[in-house]
Amino acid sequence: MRRLLIAGNWKMNASMTTSSALLSELVNADISTCDVAVFPPFPYLALAAESLRASSVRFGAQDCSDELSGAYTGEVSAAMLRDVGASMVLVGHSERRQRHHETDALVLKKAQQILAEDMTAVVCVGETLAQRQAGLAEKTVTEQLSLLLSQLSLVQWQRVVIAYEPVWAIGTGETASPEQAQSMHAHIRQLLGQVSVALAEQTRILYGGSVKSASAAELFAQPDIDGALVGGASLDAAEFLAICQS
Ligand code: PGA
């Protein structure tokens, strides 16, 4: 049985004050029924490390460099993230694919850096509205996963989580219906199954895109939805905790 993982992506929405408040609400909450992780912006990772020291809530970064170390001004390496205590890193979020032109090859390189540091890579995939309307949703997601499926070993895959985030549902208030999400998750699991049955059974596939407490329970009731990557709603402690408790 795969445990639900609820991950909060704060994006570029935080300050020292709001981060402290949010982290202390998480520390004091009873969320033992699922795995919970938060992804604060880089400047607040040390605060997360300090606040969550005695908590089961894990924390990670929203991105990392595809390089190991060296002359890459402005970049943050996977090793540095590990060094401050992060155990997970998001990679390939659609906002980075779109704004920073991140390709599947770059996403693979970043995932390899994360895995080399024994952290979990949460790889985001998802189609745009135009791709869905053109009937290309499954093809798009298949392509986004194909390099990872061909290049990562089964041992590496033990520390990969997939987050299916249809681009048209991110921050728009428009959630994919439970049926739409389930159908894509089943497709992703079938792709994993082409590599190995165990891989399909073990890999957690999260849904992301305007998840709220009101929609969470129905999403989590789907057989192939193993949790959520939550953006906007993760900035409101009560709302985020209500999703965790769904
Ligand atoms: P949202 O963001 O929940 O605000 O739609 C999800 C995400 O981008 O991870």
Image: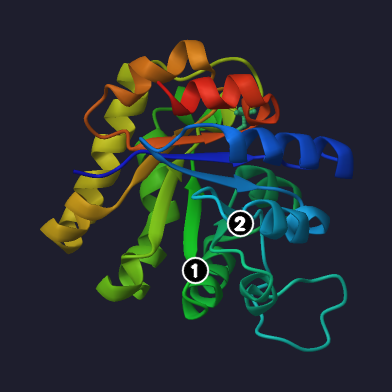
Q: Which residue lies furthest to the top in this view?
A: 214
Q: Are marks 1 and 2 in contact (CB under 8 Å)?
A: yes
Residue 240: give its label.
none
Total number of numbered discs in the rendering: 2
**The C terminus is located in which quarter?**
top left
Based on the displayed image, in which of its 4 quarters is residue 32 positioned? top left
Queried on whether the Cβ of the residue with tag 1 lies below 8 angstroms from ligand 1, the answer reads no
Mark 1 belongs to which amino acid?
A: Met
Tell me the crowding category of disc 2: few under 14, some 14 to 19, or many 20 or more residues within 10 angstroms, Cα based: many
Q: To which residue does mark 2 refer?
A: 60
Please tell me which residue is depicted at 69% across the width and 24% down the height of the picture.
Answer: 236
Give the side of residue 210 with respect to residue 135, left or right: right
Question: Could you say which is closer to the camera, residue 238 or residue 116?
Answer: 238
| Residue 244, x across and y down, in percent | 46, 29
Looking at the image, is 105 positioned above or below residue 42? below
Looking at the image, residue 1 sits to the left or right of residue 219; the answer is left
Element class at badge 2: strand
Pinpoint residue 227: horizontal percent, then vertical percent.
39, 36
* Residue of label 1: 119
Left or right of 8, for residue 120 = left
Q: Can residue 74 be seen in this view?
A: yes
Give the CA separation, mark 1 to mark 2: 9 Å
Percent position of residue 1, x then y: 18, 43
Type of residue at label 2? Gly
1 or 2: tag closer to the N-terminus: 2
Instruction: Name the element at disc 1.
Output: loop
Q: Is residue 211 above or below residue 166?
A: above
199, above or below 111, in the image: above
Judge the density around disc 1: few (<14), some (14-19), many (≥20) Cα neighbours within 10 Å: many
